[in-house]
Amino acid sequence: MSAVATEHRRSATVATEMRIRNARPKDMPAIIKIYNVAIATRISTAQLEPVTIESRRNWLNAHPPNRHPFWVLEIAGEIAGWLTLKTFLPRSAYRDTAEVSVYVDEKFRRHGVGRALLGEAIRRAPEFEINAMVGLIFAHNAPSLKLFEQLGFEKWGLLPGVARLDGVERDLTIMGWHA
């Protein structure tokens, strides 16, 4: 079997084993591990220092499952990625808009994990009374920008040079979606 056929078969198998569910406290070590790897890459978060379970102990409580969920995607019982929806801005006129964040474990990248999580958020947005989602993505994060665009998000704005990562100014792209 060719390498391409093997990879296609593996991707198809992985896709059939995906399960999205609400995150639980016992998931925090895997969630933190994924996030800390993302911090180190300097491509997907403005957080500069690794986080601990203790520093994020209230993270799940800040995400009521009926409004702003915190989901994990499991593959064969392993946390492959996670997604959060959260309040975009605290003023009440923005109550129907959520900020979306997606993180995928390194070994599960390019297997549809981010697509499945973001697709679920889009599909279930009406259930959460969300009619708009905003993703704040570094302009140098081409894979995330491509994913969001493929799922119907549009570029709504650019904030040039607003982040400094290891002495390098980085632009922030605002990707938006309307129901």
Image (cartoon, rainbow, N blue to C red):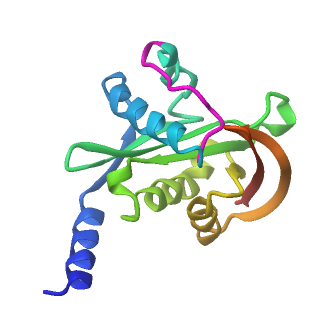
Residue 114 position in % (x across, y down): 47, 56
Q: Residue at x 52, y 45 (%)?
A: 41
In which quadrant will I find the N terminus? Answer: bottom left
Residue 124 position in % (x across, y down): 54, 52
**Residue 42 located left or right of residue 176:** left
Residue at the extreme front of the image, as rendered: 167
Q: Residue at x 44, y 39 (%)?
A: 37
Residue at the extreme left of the image, as rendered: 1
| Picture quadrant where residue 163 is located | top right
Residue 42 position in % (x across, y down): 59, 44
Q: For the image shown, how many numbered marks are present on the structure?
A: 0
Residue at the extreme top of the image, as rendered: 54
Residue 105 position in % (x across, y down): 38, 47
Q: Residue at x 27, y 78 (%)?
A: 8
Vertical arrangement, residue 23 with respect to residue 151, above or below? above
In which quadrant will I find the C terminus? Answer: bottom right
